Amino acid sequence: MMIGVDTETLIDVWQRLLADPRKSWVLFEHGTCVVLTAPEGELAEQATDLLKKFGPAHAGSSAGDFGVIDLKDVEGWVVTGHHNDVLTYVRPDEPQDQSQIAVGLFGRSKRHRDGTELHVVHVEDKRGSVAPA
């Protein structure tokens, strides 16, 4: 699988944002990350099922809702949706208008693309990295 520069940058960003050694996560092509709080089986499949359900945006419903998080350690924003573990990264050079609403709508559109295209580009499996409690 050929990984583009963009994908490598996204992986780096999410590795910095999700530094918890117990968090497994799956990254999709347009920057949406699904954090798996109870990882089991095939992680890409588990994340795809979650994103298929919670990725597509439907205006006027909770699926159209979003929040914008200004990042401290990384340039850009994370856009949240109606599932706490589905997060989309927006680079500072992506939206021309950098108001909260424009960034949120941009991130929501990226999440929608990821939720309909469902193209996994990276799996971060942390299940074996921490000794059981």
Image: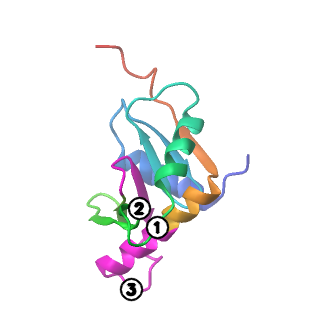
Give the x, y percent position of residue 49. Answer: 55, 42
Give the quarter of the image for residue 114: bottom right
Q: Amino acid at mark 3?
A: Asp
Q: Residues within 10 Å of mark 2 (few under 14, many from 20)?
A: some
Give the x, y percent position of residue 41. Answer: 55, 25
- Horizontal side, residue 85 vs residue 93: left or right: left
- Name the outermost residue toward the right: 1
Residue at 30% x, 77% y is 100
Residue that label 1 marks: 58
What colouring does the structure picture have?
rainbow
Q: Which comes before the other along the chain, label 3 or label 2?
A: 2
- Horizontal side, residue 57 vs residue 133: left or right: right
Of 46 and 24, which appears nearest the observer? 46
Residue at 43% x, 61% y is 89
Q: Residues within 10 Å of mark 1 (few under 14, many from 20)?
A: few
Give the spatial CA distance, label 3 vs label 1.
Answer: 22 Å
Give the x, y percent position of residue 60. Answer: 38, 72
Of 55 and 33, which appears nearest the observer? 55
Residue that label 3 marks: 97
Q: Residues within 10 Å of mark 3 (few under 14, many from 20)?
A: few
Give the quarter of the image for residue 74: bottom left
Residue at 53% x, 36% y is 46
Check whether the beta carbons of the residues at disc 1 and disc 2 lie within 8 A of each other: yes
From the image, state whether disc 3 or disc 1 is nearer to you: 1
Of 14 and 114, which appears nearest the observer? 114
In the image, is residue 126 above or below residue 10?
A: above
Check whether the beta carbons of the residues at disc 3 and disc 1 lie within 8 A of each other: no
Residue that label 2 marks: 63
Bounds of the magenta span?
Answer: 82-109
